[in-house]
Amino acid sequence: MKLILAPMEGLADYWVRQVLTACAAYDWCVSEFVRVNGELLPPRVLHRWCPELGHGARTLAGTPVHLQLLGSDPACMADNAALAVELGAPAIDLNFGCPAKTVNRHRGGAVLLDEPELVHAVTAAVRRAVPATVPVSVKMRLGNDDDQRALDNARGVQSAGAAWLTVHGRTKRQGYRPPAYWDRIGDIREAVTVPVIANGEIWTLEDARRCQRESGCQDLMLGRGAVANPLLCRELRDQHGQAGAPATWDQVLAVLCRFADSIVGTGTDAQLCGRVKQWLSYSRRRWPEAGPLLESVKRETLIEPLAEALHQAATRLPSRPAARPVTGSPA
């Protein structure tokens, strides 16, 4: 079973990738998408969205980082993929799943699933542009407004040379509303011969097992569930490959403390406080203790006092594992 940390725009950035991959052994993670709009991007843009390119395209914990591109111009996508590989990207992932309206209006993301021929053309162009040793993969949803073209898109990216396909089990119209249709991912898996990775609505060990049963996919990509429970990957697979022990609130709070410490000075206080509060909000899904803590810091507007409040909350718990600081910078 492979476990992959999903690309999540505005959520799974450099700092989140560092913290989450330090918690558990992901096979790889995928960068936030780099938007390609008809021009060859300067290297600094690729480094901005994937700072790990500066240190071997790996997180500080050693997890490989695949670079994701989003766009609809085959030639331009190919040129930028070739540049990304020159800069050290070990693999290129193509985004045909983003549901954001601003992205879709500019012919990017899930809206392209209405045009299987274009999805094929983009994938094929990127595949031709990079060395055969560099995998090219595709991440897609079941469709745009409906899933009627799901199999056409899957077969198209396979024939274009994609090494594997990750499928989020919802259409763009369905957004992130439960449920994810894991059985429809299974239909895609049966229609192609390339490996298929299942994604969507995996929050717990039980969810993961159900997803595997219904989709027939053993490999899983974890998204928001990995933020809500930063130790989810470890719960699904410990160092021996078996299901690990359930995470506890003190362990999760220790991760939140490390994250808050790591982002001090990396943005405005409003941005950074918002990120920590967002993480606490996700955590409420599983740990009721996160609710009162969020309530106590929700009016805090400075990141350092907020980080200190997290540490104080952690010291009041019966036990807390030693925090392992995240070091380094995206420069």
Image (cartoon, rainbow, N blue to C red):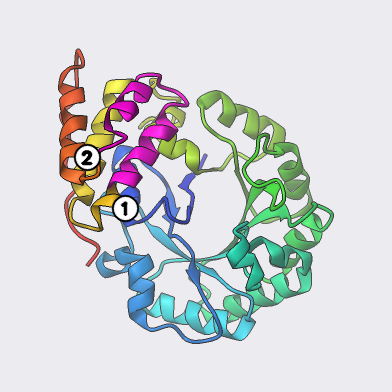
Horizontal and vertical percent for residue 80?
48, 80
Q: Is residue 216 above or below residue 249?
A: below
Q: Is residue 81 above or below residue 166?
A: below
Mostly what secondary structure, the magenta segment? helix
Of residues 245 and 35, the one drawn nearer to the viewer in this rendering: 35
Residue farthest toward the top in the current orientation of the protein:
318
Among numbered discs 2 and 1, the one appearing first in the sequence: 2
Gap between marks 2 and 1 measured at Cα: 17 Å
Q: Amino acid at mark 1?
A: Gln
Structural crowding at the residue carrying mark 2, measured as other residues with C-alpha within 10 Å and reported as few (<14), some (14–19) or many (≥20):
some
> What residue span does the magenta drawing correspond to?
273-300
Q: Tell me the tag on residue 258.
A: 2
Of residues 101 and 5, the one drawn nearer to the viewer in this rendering: 101
**Which is in the foreground here, disc 2 or disc 1?**
1
Q: Is residue 21 visible?
A: no
Q: Is residue 40 above or below residue 313?
A: below
* Element marked by disc 1: helix
Q: Quadrant of residue 127?
A: bottom right
Q: Circle 1 sits on which residue?
A: 271
Is 306 positioned to the left or the right of 183 in the image? left
Q: Is residue 324 magenta?
A: no
Q: Quadrant of residue 73?
A: bottom right
Q: Amino acid at mark 2?
A: Arg
